[in-house]
Amino acid sequence: FFFQQPNTATMGKYVQAQRKGKSPIFKAHIRTRKGAVKLRSIDYAERRGYVRGVIKDIMHDPGRGAPVAKVQFLNAYRFKRDTELMVATEGMYTGQFIYCGKKATLTIGNVLPLRGVPEGTIVCNVEAKVGDRGAFARGSGCFAVVISHDE
């Protein structure tokens, strides 16, 4: 007497929302997305002092809950302007000057190292490692609180 197990691989259904990366059909619609949202790459001016940028636009990015700010900086090495996309914090507005660097003041929208931020400060878009351009607290309504500085 020989008992054969039924083929269980054909039972059930695929969840269509989970098939986005499997084939040309059912892919995520990314045509209208604005781009990768990152902090500025750290250069000499940001390590020693600060760099000023102006918020040109705050826009909605499809596929993301948080609004995106288009920030324009002067290039320190060539005669041109650099445009960066950053996660917009609550209180940002178009035309606002933001400062990125070690000597920037602690105000809404500014980017500065965590060692210069006092305990109890609410922050967002925090780097996991130095130079990775933002990893933690990047979604809409997400924030992190600086608890202590461990040296």
Image (cartoon, grey):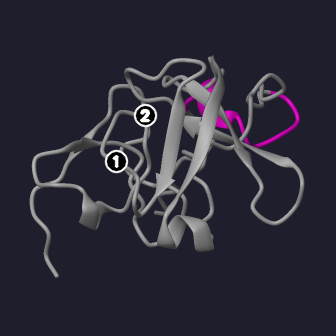
Asked whether, in this view, residue 93 is left or right of residue 29, the answer is left
Examine the rendering and report whether any part of residue 14 can be seen.
no
Q: Which residue is mark 1?
A: 105
> Dot 1: what SS?
loop
**Left or right position of 84 against 47:** right
Q: Residues within 10 Å of mark 1 (few under 14, many from 20)?
A: some
Amino acid type assigned to the residue bearing label 2 in the image: Gly
For marks 2 and 1, the one nearer the N-term is 1
Q: Which residues are magenta?
A: 12-25
Splitting the image into 4 quarters, where does residue 113 fall? Answer: bottom left
What is the x, y in percent for residue 52? 58, 46
Where's residue 19, x and y in %?
A: 68, 35
Residue 55 x/y as whole percent: 61, 28
Q: Which residue is mark 2?
A: 139
Which residue ends up furthest to the bottom in the rendered image? 151
Disc 2 crowd, CA 10 A, few/some/many (<14, 14-19, 20+)? some
In the image, residue 7 lies at what x, y percent?
Answer: 59, 47
From mark 2 to mark 1, how far is it between C-alphas? 24 Å
Q: Is residue 19 magenta?
A: yes
Whether residues under marks 2 and 1 lie with C-beta atoms below 8 angstroms apart, the answer is no
- Horizontal placement of 55 versus 76: left or right? left
Q: Amino acid at mark 1?
A: Thr
User: Would you say residue 7 sits in the magenta stretch?
Assistant: no
